[in-house]
Every structure is written in C-alpha cells, then in structure tokens.
Amino acid sequence: MMERLPAWAQTCLHWLLTPHVLVVLSVGSVAMFVLSVVGVPWFFARVPADYFTRRERGELGMRTVHQPGWRVALRVLKNILGAVVFMAGVAMLVLPGQGVLTILASLFLVDFPGKRRLQRRILALKPVFRTLNRLRQRAGRAPLERGSSG
C-alpha cells in the first residue's frame, strides 16, 4: 500500500509511525482529554450566570477607554490562548475529549465581531444549554440565564 503513495506522503507516514512521535501524540491526546474533562467544567462554572443577558458596553453608551500597553498584551495573549483552545476543541471532535464544549470555551477567550451573537446561537441549542447548566449545578452555581439569540 505504501508503494502507491507519493514520496512526500510516504516520508510523512514513516515519520508519524516512529515510536517517539507516537508517544508524543498519545501523551498529548491523553493530556487534552484530561484537561477537557477537568478544565471545561471548571471554566463554565465560573462564567457569571447573567453573562448572556448583560448589555454590551456599546449598548449602554459607554465610551471605550484607552488601555495601557500591558492590558493590550494580555488581550493578545488571551486571544492566542483562545485560538489554541479552539484548535484543541476541533481536534477533540475526532479525539477523546469534549470538543463542542471546548470550542464554546474558546469563544469566550477570543475577540471578534459578532462574538456574542454566535455564543447566543450556540447556547440556544437545547443540548448545549442543558449540558452547561448541569455542569454548573454540579459545581453549586446558579444556572445560566438565557439571552436573546439574535
């Protein structure tokens, strides 16, 4: 079968099947699974119950304040972390872990236009909403309040 593959694909497959790469992939997969099982429920338990019903700063007519450089740096790091968590969530769709909830958690970290609208649409899915509130109930937190989905 390997003879049918192009040379570059044979090289990649050979590299992927080396013992040290398989160990790294296995350890990474187990680590992502453990982090998703522990980290995702912890994260969603700490989201304020009114997160989806609060008004945005712009809707309240509040001006945006100039942020110092360190706050901008933290915001960039938060977005990078969100992108990494998003990629891990996508990987968990086929690997062990809570892929959909991890992707949703990443949406809390990254900043992009339409973020709240997308979060509300995902939360409007009854299985997602029930799962998040079950996680919050186990942590002794109030259920999430449902915001508008539009």
Image (cartoon, grey):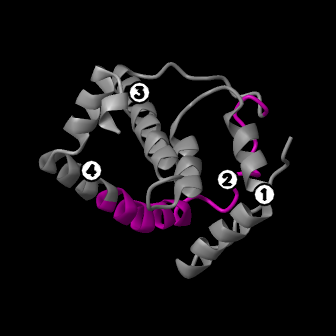
Residue picked out by circle 4 = 25
Mark with earlier residue (4, 2): 4
> Taking 22 as reference, is 7 above or below it?
above
Q: Residue at horizontal 56%, vertical 44%? A: 108
Query: Residue 66 versus residue 130: which sits nearer the camera?
Result: 130
User: Which residue type carries mark 2?
Assistant: Tyr
Asked if residue 48 lies in the magenta stretch, the reply is yes
Report, in whole angstroms, how far the alpha carbon at label 4 lies from the one at label 1.
Answer: 33 Å
Total tally of numbered discs in the picture: 4
Q: Are marks 2 and 3 in contact (CB under 8 Å)?
A: no
Residue 30, position as x, y percentages in the image: 31, 62
Real-space CA distance between mark 2 and mark 1, rounded to the nearest whole angstrom = 17 Å
Q: Amino acid at mark 4?
A: Leu
Q: Which residues are magenta?
A: 30-59
Gap between marks 4 and 3, in whole Å?
28 Å
Residue drawn 55% across and 22% down? 65
Q: Tell me the amino acid under the disc marked 1.
A: Leu
Question: 78 and 9: which one is in front?
Answer: 9
Residue 54 visible in the picture: no
Give SS at disc 3.
helix
Mark 3 or mark 1, earlier in chain: 3
Mark 3 or 1: in front is 1
Separation of residues labelled 3 and 1 (CA atoms): 30 Å
Name the residue: 69% across, 45% down: 119
- Residue on which the image places disc 2: 51
In the picture of the structure, the residue carrying the numbered disc 1 is 125
What SS does tag 1 mark? loop
First-in-chain label (4 vs 1): 4
- First in sequence: mark 4 vs mark 3: 4
